[in-house]
């Protein structure tokens, strides 16, 4: 059974392995571990969730709060990745939808609510379809040559 859970410190290594597999800028495993660890330490501004089956991490998502701990929270879907061997089975969809419920619960406990979600991805990345489907996000603009090419900024807006 695949479960979506808040990441724990002892999962930083497993997350970093998927990061280094999936993102060209973080191919070096020790850099990926450093990146993952510093994000992990930045809780609650940065929040990792993992998809796991038993002890095996199949994928992860990183949510990041922007502009302060606002009553009307602005959150970025900073990164999502699923191990190559497990793609196309609905795990990415499950990670987004189930972790988003946990983010909304966290905000509610803080006395805040979700205003919008921002997500950027490559103009040719099929993840755009995933964000449209799971978040209702729409492309609002394109940034030229951001990381390794042009990136779209997608926004999902939520009612007050
Ligand atoms: C984006 C990503 C997380 C999706 O994970 P996933 O577990 O494969 O996602 P799902 O199985 O839930 O599929 C979601 C959609 O992606 C598409 N998709 C999934 N696997 C695909 C494949 N092998 N080829 C083409 N499209 C695919 C489908 O359109 C699917 O939509 P559907 O539900 O209408 O069929 C995964 O492809 C990944 O890790 N990519 C590398 C990292 C990355 O680019 N992250 C996003 C930018 S930060």
Image: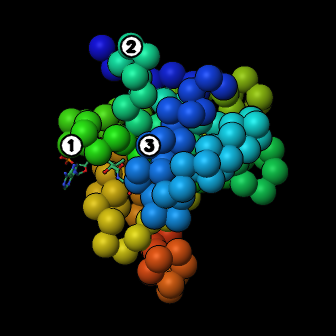
Nearer to the camera, 44 or 87: 87
What is the tally of numbered marks visible in this picture? 3
Nearer to the camera, 140 or 77: 77
Q: Secondary structure at mark 2?
A: loop
Task: Work out whether residue 109 can be spotted.
Answer: yes
Pointer 1: residues within 10 angstroms few (<14), some, or many (20+)? few
Q: Quadrant of residue 45?
A: top right
Closer to viewer: mark 2 or mark 1: 2
Q: Quadrant of residue 24?
A: bottom left
Which residue is drawn at the image coordinates 78% and 57% (left, top)? 67
Residue at the disc numbered 1: 88
Position of 148 with respect to 106 (left or right) is: left
Position of 82 with respect to 41 (left or right) is: left
Nearer to the camera, 158 or 10: 10
Task: Work out whether residue 154 can be spotted.
Answer: no
Label 2 and label 1: CA atoms lie apart by 20 Å
Q: Is mark 1 within 8 Å of ligand 1?
A: yes
Which residue is drawn at the image coordinates 48% and 41% (left, top)? 17
Label 1 and label 3: CA atoms lie apart by 16 Å
Q: Position of residue 36 (x, y in %)?
A: 63, 43
Q: Earlier in the sequence, mark 1 or mark 3?
A: 3
Residue at the disc numbered 3: 18
Q: Earlier in the sequence, mark 2 or mark 1?
A: 2
Q: Position of residue 38 (x, y in %)?
A: 73, 44
Closer to viewer: mark 1 or mark 3: 3
Where residue 54 is drawn, which disc sits there?
2
Q: Position of residue 25 (x, y in %)?
A: 52, 64
Pointer 3: residues within 10 angstroms few (<14), some, or many (20+)? many
Q: Is mark 3 within 8 Å of ligand 1?
A: yes
Does the CB distance between marks 3 and 2 fall below 8 Å? Answer: no
């Amino acid at each position: 059974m695949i479960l979506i859970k808040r990441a724990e410190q002892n999962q930083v290594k497993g997350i970093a392995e998927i990061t280094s597999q999936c993102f060209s800028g973080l191919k070096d495993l020790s850099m990926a571990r450093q990146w993952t660890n510093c994000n992990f330490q930045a809780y609650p501004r940065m929040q990792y969730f993992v998809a796991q089956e038993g002890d095996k991490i199949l994928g992860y998502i990183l949510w990041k709060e922007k502009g302060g701990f606002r009553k009307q929270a602005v959150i970025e879907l900073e990164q999502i990745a699923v191990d190559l061997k497990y793609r196309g089975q609905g795990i990415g969809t499950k990670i987004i939808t189930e972790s988003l419920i946990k983010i909304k619960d966290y905000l509610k406990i803080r006395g805040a609510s979700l205003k919008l979600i921002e997500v950027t991805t490559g103009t040719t990345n099929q993840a755009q379809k995933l964000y449209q489907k799971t978040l209702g996000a729409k492309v609002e603009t394109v940034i030229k040559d951001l990381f390794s090419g042009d990136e779209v900024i997608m926004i999902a807006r939520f009612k007050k």
